[in-house]
Amino acid sequence: MPTLLGVDHIAIAVEDLDQATDLWQQALGARLGPRETVESQGVELQMLYAGETRVELLRPLSPESPVGRFLTKRGPGLHHLALAVPECGDALEQARDAGLRTLSEEPVPGAHGTRVVFLHPGDTGGVLTELVEGGEGPWSSPQQETKA
Ligand code: CO
C-alpha cells in the first residue's frame, strides 16, 4: 500500500470561487493562499490554510470538466481528499497492485508543481482520493525527502 505522509488538502467543489473564498477567509478565518488555474484538470482553484491544513476550493472551467459534471450531478460540496505520498509513481503502482483503479495511467501535473494521481472512488469507499507528491506539508522538508 502507498506510504501516506498526511493529508495534503481537502477539496471542495464550488460554483462561485470569490464567494466561497470569502466564506472561508472572512467567516471561518482561514488564511488566503494562492489562486491558480490548472487547465489539465479543468479547474480554477483557491488554496486556503487552516493552520497546517489546506483547503482547496475548486471551480470548474467548463460544465464538461470532471468538477463541472460533479457540480451538475451533486451540487457544491466535498469533492476529494488528497493524501501526501513520497513518490507518486510508486504510490500509483502500489495502489494498482492492491486492486484499486486509477483515473490516469500515469501521474499527472497537479497544482503548483505537484504530481498527482486520483483513485477511483468506487474502490475507495465512495471517497475520491488524490495521491500527491511534492506538496507543501511539514513532511516536505529536504531531510524527510530522502526517505522516498
Ligand atoms: Co486536489
Image (spheres, rainbow, N blue to C red):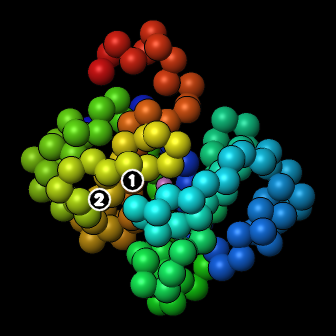
Residue 138 percent location from the top left of the image: 56, 25
Instruction: Tell me the amino acid under the disc marked 1.
Output: Glu
Q: Earlier in the sequence, mark 2 or mark 1?
A: 2
Asked if 57 appears above or below 33 in the picture, the reply is below
Residue at image point 22% right, 46% down: 92
- The residue shown at (47%, 14%) is 142
SS assignment at label 2: strand
Circle 1 SS class: strand
The image quadrant of residue 144 is top left
The answer to whether mark 2 and mark 1 are in CB contact below 8 A is: yes
Q: Nearer the viewer, residue 133 or 119?
A: 133
Residue 102 appears in the rendering: yes
Q: Which residue is mark 1?
A: 130
Label 1 CB, ligand 1: below 8 Å?
A: yes
Q: Can residue 70 be spotted in the picture?
A: no
In the image: residue 92, left or right of residue 69? left
Can you identify the residue that label 2 sits on?
119
Picture coordinates of residue 73, whole percent (x, y): 47, 89
Rendered image quadrant of residue 2? top left
Could you say where residue 88 lies in the image, as x and y percent from the top left? Answer: 29, 39
Q: Is residue 144 above or below residue 120?
A: above
Instruction: Give the side of residue 40 with respect to residue 30, left or right.
Output: left
Q: Is residue 41 left or right of residue 52?
A: left
